[in-house]
Image (cartoon, rainbow, N blue to C red):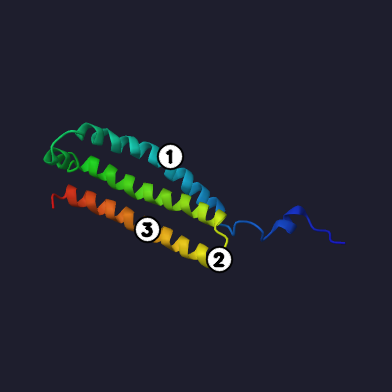
Amino acid sequence: MQFRTDRQRATGLGAAKEGVSHWWNQRVSAVALAVLVLLFIWPLGAALGESHEEVLETYRNPFNAIVAILMFGTAFFHLKLGLQVVIEDYVHGKAMRTALLLANTLLCAFFGIAGIFAVVKIALGA
């Protein structure tokens, strides 16, 4: 007969001490996106129907450029976290899960960097 507490029986069976930080990162990025998307859509909506040069001028404004950069970075970070949870929950083969997690990280990083690069290029007038 073993005299172990519930905590002793559960030790080592959790999320490997990463679950809480992942959860917090998802929640913080979601709240940040709620604000950033509104700040991103406001000048974008105002620029709809304008000429190409007027749209470029909108995003040469430092505030609009910084908001766009933060929005792209946060959006693709949040996407990576969400897809990671789906992959970990629903893909069962270890090799396939590892490959998809790597692809998820690389693709989200690539598209996030591409969006940020595009905004920087517009903001600097290149």
**Residue 39 coordinates in the image, percent (x, y):** 30, 36
Badge 1: few (under 14), some or many (20 or more) residues near its Cα, within 10 Å? few
**Residue 119 coordinates in the image, percent (x, y):** 23, 49
93 on left or right of 61: right
Q: Amino acid at mark 2?
A: Lys
Q: Amino acid at mark 1?
A: Val
Residue underneath mark 1: 31
Residue visible at 44% across and 63% down in the picture? 102
3D distance between C-alphas at marks 1 and 3:
23 Å
User: In the picture shown, does residue 122 fall above or below 15?
Assistant: above
3D distance between C-alphas at marks 3 and 2:
20 Å
**Residue 27 coordinates in the image, percent (x, y):** 48, 43
Quadrant of residue 32 within the rendered picture: top left
Q: How many marks?
A: 3
3D distance between C-alphas at marks 2 and 1:
32 Å
Q: Amino acid at mark 3?
A: Leu
Residue underneath mark 3: 107
Residue underneath mark 2: 94
